[in-house]
Structure formats: structure tokens, C-alpha cells
Image (cartoon, grey):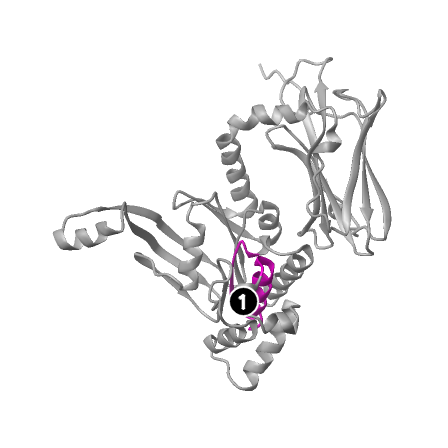
Amino acid sequence: MTIRFEGIEKTYMVYARPQDRLWEWVTRSQRHRVHVALTGIDFEVKSGETFGLIGENGAGKSTLLKIAAGTIRPTCGQVTQEGRVAALLELGAGFHPEESGYDNIRFMAALHGLEGHAMEEFIVRATAFSELTEETLERPVKTYSSGMFMRLAFAAATAIDPDVLIVDEALSVGDLHFQKKSLNRILELRERGATVLFCSHNLYQVRSLCQRAAWIHGGRIQAIGATEDVVTAYESHERRRYAHLRVESNEIVKKDDAEQSIAPLSALALVKIGGLTIETGDGVNPAQVDSFQDMSVEIVIESYADAPFHVLFAIVRPDKDNVFGTSTQFRAEEKPLQGVGTHRIRMRFPRLSLLSGEYLWSVYVLDDSGIQVLDMAELIQPFTVLNQKHREFGVTWLEHEWVLVE
């Protein structure tokens, strides 16, 4: 169902001290300053579309989602939407901490107007999806961990088959198994035609899930349109914003033991990155590579379960700017890797077209959908490329020829 934001503005009155509110009322003189959380928000999310919201902390994303969900009202403007709305906002929102998981699920069902047999079906679906034990569901939710909260909240929000699903960073909490299960549920709802408003700092998930996106900066829409265009613009902004961190990144490049940079996403991951090896005619893991030299890279993956997975890797600069990236998912057959044991994946780069500069590798193990990150190793195995035979400059060589018109 369509969600339309028309002239949305949200402001808050901020007081330096609590008593200033009272003195303002008594004296009729202003003792507050106005904080503008959102202004000039005007766009539409189409029916059946998965729409992403990105931006730095404090940009106004969560405020916009709360307005979309109806938990707060805008100062100006209006939101129009149709159908049944389910929202996953801040952790545990809408739960009564003193009540049990079962009672909170019943409360959620009642809020959606369910009763009798429909309520019982809702409870069965929600509890089954959450995978929480009966003993856990009978406890007050104030005793739950953040992962348990997320399980219960997501299960309750999606058990009704909503027409509109609003998700605010909820998938960053919990174990990998349930994160994947939740992502699959979002994909299932999307296939059924549900409209999804998805907010996340995980830009890979935004790229994979969303057809369009909006970048919010300082309470305003900085860019809106095709996801790749918006995410690329945001990444460029972030690189400029954190340019002062390049010195620190260069220190990473100088580490002698690059293997120390491999930091698994989860110690419990069933698929782990074992290592990465570069090979040229000059040997294994050379510190220096010449432009147009043949190079191959081998990635070792250890799989402890017979679950399918994909491998994505990228050549990056010290400022984390991606130079080139590819995935086993992009192959013609698109088949994931599978099987318990050691997997070795080799990629050949004949006549490496990189020009002079410092480079590193980032490797990611993804699930069979190519969305959920199971393990990662970023900024590893540094190497330097020297372009000693040509005078061209930049990042990569492009085939070209000069034509003198006159």
C-alpha cells in the first residue's frame, strides 16, 4: 500500500533546565530553543515497494519512521497510508515490561483488532516464529535479553501479514540464524506485495533489498531515487566526512601480519573466512605488485554445516573506497557453494590494470540469498601497486587512443 509524506516537519522545544518550562508559562517569555528534527519531507513510497532510509545517527530517520507508524505526530504536514501497518521501531516499543511474552503478544493481537479464533491463530504463529521456549514466554519481558526482545517484536509484527512493514535497525540485534530468518520473512512479505520501509546502517542490505532509497541529512532529504545512486552519494559524503581517519587507515596498511586484521563477525558462525593469499610471478603475498602483472587471489573458507553460501570480495583503498568487487552470486550459474569442510576459491586477474597506489582486500561470506552477512574480514592483506612502465595516473588503466581531429 502507498505511503505518502506531504510537507512533513517535526520540531521539539528544548529547555536547558526542567524548571524553565514552568517559568516560561508563568512569565510568558521564551526560555526554550527550537530543535528541527525534520523539515521539507515530501515523497511517496509506492505500493509493493521496498524503500530504504539511510543517513548518519541523528539525521532524523527514526523520527520519520515513528511518524509513518503513527506513534508520534508531525508538527506540520501529514502522512497518508492504507492497509494494516506493522512497525519495528526502538527495541521493545509497545511491550509492557511487567507482563509476560504471552500477554504482550495477546495485547499486540488486540491492538490489531483480533479476537477469538483469529487471536489464537496469531499467538500460535508469533510464538512459533519467535522460537522462544514456553518458559521464556511465561516470564516478564523485562527479564529478556535484547535478542529475545527482537525475536518477540519481529514475530508479533509480522504474524498479521501486514500491508505495510516499517523496520528501524531491528535486524542488527540477535543471532545470525534469526537475522536470516527475519530477512527471509521480509522477502516473503515483499513477494506478497507488502510495502516495506527499511532503515539500516547496513548499506549492503539496503542495496540488496530496496528498489529506491532516500538519504536524510540534518532533517532534510539530501538525495532520493534509485538505491545505487543514493547509497553511492551517501558513501561519498561519508568518505569526505571521515577524511581525517586516513592516517589511521594507513597505519593498518603498514601492519606486517595482515592476518591479525581478520575479525570474524561471530564466533558462532557456521561458515568462517580462513584466509586470503595473493600470488604473482614474484611469489606469494608480495608487498609490491607491478601494474599489468598477472595476479591471482585465493580465499579459504571453512564450512562447519551443509548450508549454502556465497563469497563476495573487493579490492579497496585505505579510505575504504571500493575499487572493484564481485561475488560468486554474480556468476552465470549463480549457484551457491555448499558442503562441510574447506573451500578454496581462486580468482585470476590477467594483466592487473590497477595503477600506482596502496590497496587492501575485504572479504564477506553471505547466505544463499546474498543478503545476510555470515562472516567478514575487512581491510586485510595490504599490497602496493607501482606503475613503472607508464605515466598515466589514477586508480585503474582504461584502454584508450588519441585522435587528432585537426
Callout 1 secondary element: helix
Q: Can residue 60 be seen? A: yes
Q: Quadrant of residue 158?
A: bottom right
Q: Quadrant of residue 133?
A: bottom right
Tell me where the magenta segment starts and ends, as one range: 145-170
Is residue 356 left or right of 45 when viewed as pictured? right
Q: Name the residue under label 1.
A: 141
Q: Is 151 part of what is drawn in magenta?
A: yes
**Residue at x 34%, y 61% (from the top left corner):** 73
Q: Residue furthest bottom?
A: 116
Residue type, mark 1 in image: Val
- The percent position of residue 197, horizontal first and vertical second, equals 51, 58
Q: Can residue 4 be seen? A: no
**Residue at x 69%, y 58% (from the top left corner):** 177
With respect to residue 283, does 185 lie above or below? Answer: below
Is residue 61 left or right of 317 when viewed as pictured? left
Q: Is 85 part of what is drawn in magenta?
A: no
Closer-to-camera residue (199/342): 342
With respect to residue 106, does 153 lie above or below? Answer: above
Is residue 75 left or right of 24 when viewed as pictured? right
- The percent position of residue 268, horizontal first and vertical second, equals 73, 51
